[in-house]
Amino acid sequence: MKSTPFLPTPLPGLLSFGRAGRLSRRHFRTAHGVLFGLVLWGLGGGLGLVAAPQSSDKTGVQSVEGGPDPLAVLRGVRESQAAIQQTLQGKLRMGSRKLPYRMVMNGGDLRFEFPEAQAPDPQVVTLSFGSKDASVQVQSTAGAVKKAQFADEIAGMGVLYEDLAMRFLYWTEAELEGEERLMPPLYLRCWKIRVHRPNGVRSVYKEVVVWVSQDNGGILKSEAYDDAGTLIRRLKVVSIQGMDQGTTLKQMRIESPQKGGAFVYLDVDGNPAVKVSK
């Protein structure tokens, strides 16, 4: 049985659960994480599970010496999307509002279909991941297709097209800030990388801080800041789940602090969740 990359997506390659409910080591193919802020990711290799550290501070940022080139880490996440051939479905939730979707991953293209979309909301959103940047096209309920603006919000659900495209993975200015453990009780060891918007690039974000798992290449968390240095978007993997192909994302939480801190959730339908983080 092949493993499917796991998230933030968030995330990637992945976690599998043995009969006794304990996590087991499994090798997996590389994968790309498309955000919704992060739905699936990976760099390749095997999932090496990390035991919780003995220190009482399990999640503090630690400085590192001789760490990897941060651009190489981001490039690995970006280039690995060709490994994913999968269809998932679920819903976006914000308060009492729900927007069902079908997500089709086919190598360098990702398509979100919204079967219950009402005009003027998009019926289909297609992301294409090139060698230097990502592009987005939207199809209306009337069938018209146009290029989307990255700063536009999707159906008023608190998610930007820029969040879907994860364009910061293409930025060429980044620094490794250290390592940190995320997703208790797993406490996966992550590289913490700060990515800066290059001159000449148009984006609503000036900087993005991203946490990439050292063990499976998954993007477990990201925080985006505007030109004033204000946090305007946070994405975090909340739970994972077992599926026929392996383990994948169950729920991603998207927060916009400048909009009152209301949460938007990206849910993936499947088996009961394995909750790993608050």
Image: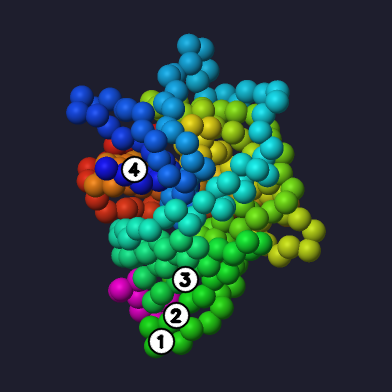
* Residue 58 on image: x %, y %: 50, 20
User: CB under 8 Å between callouts 2 and 3?
Assistant: yes
Q: Residues within 10 Å of mark 2 (few under 14, many from 20)?
A: some
| Quarter that holds the N terminus | top left
Q: Is residue 189 above or below residue 38?
A: above
Q: Please tell me which residue is depicted at 39% across the width and 52% down the height of the picture.
A: 265
Which residue is label 3 attached to?
A: 126
In the rendered structure, which segment of residues is drawn in magenta?
114-122
* Residue 165 on image: x %, y %: 54, 61
User: CB under 8 Å between callouts 2 and 1?
Assistant: yes
Q: Which mark is residue 203?
A: none
Which residue is label 1 attached to?
A: 143
| Res 61 → quadrant | top right
Mark with earlier residue (2, 3)? 3
Which residue is label 2 attached to?
A: 139
Mark with earlier residue (4, 1)? 4
Q: Main secondary structure of the magenta part?
A: loop
Mark with earlier residue (2, 4)? 4
Mark with earlier residue (4, 3)? 4
Q: Please tell me which residue is depicted at 36% across the width and 79% down the height of the picture.
A: 118
User: Which secondary structure, mark 2?
Assistant: strand
Q: Is residue 117 magenta?
A: yes
Q: Is residue 150 left or right of residue 229?
A: left
* Residue 181 on image: x %, y %: 51, 27
Q: Nearer the viewer, residue 265 or 95?
A: 265
Amino acid type at image mark 2? Gln
Q: Is residue 156 magenta?
A: no
Label 4 to label 1, Cα distance in Å?
A: 36 Å
**Residue 88 can be seen in this image:** yes
Which residue is label 4 attached to?
A: 3
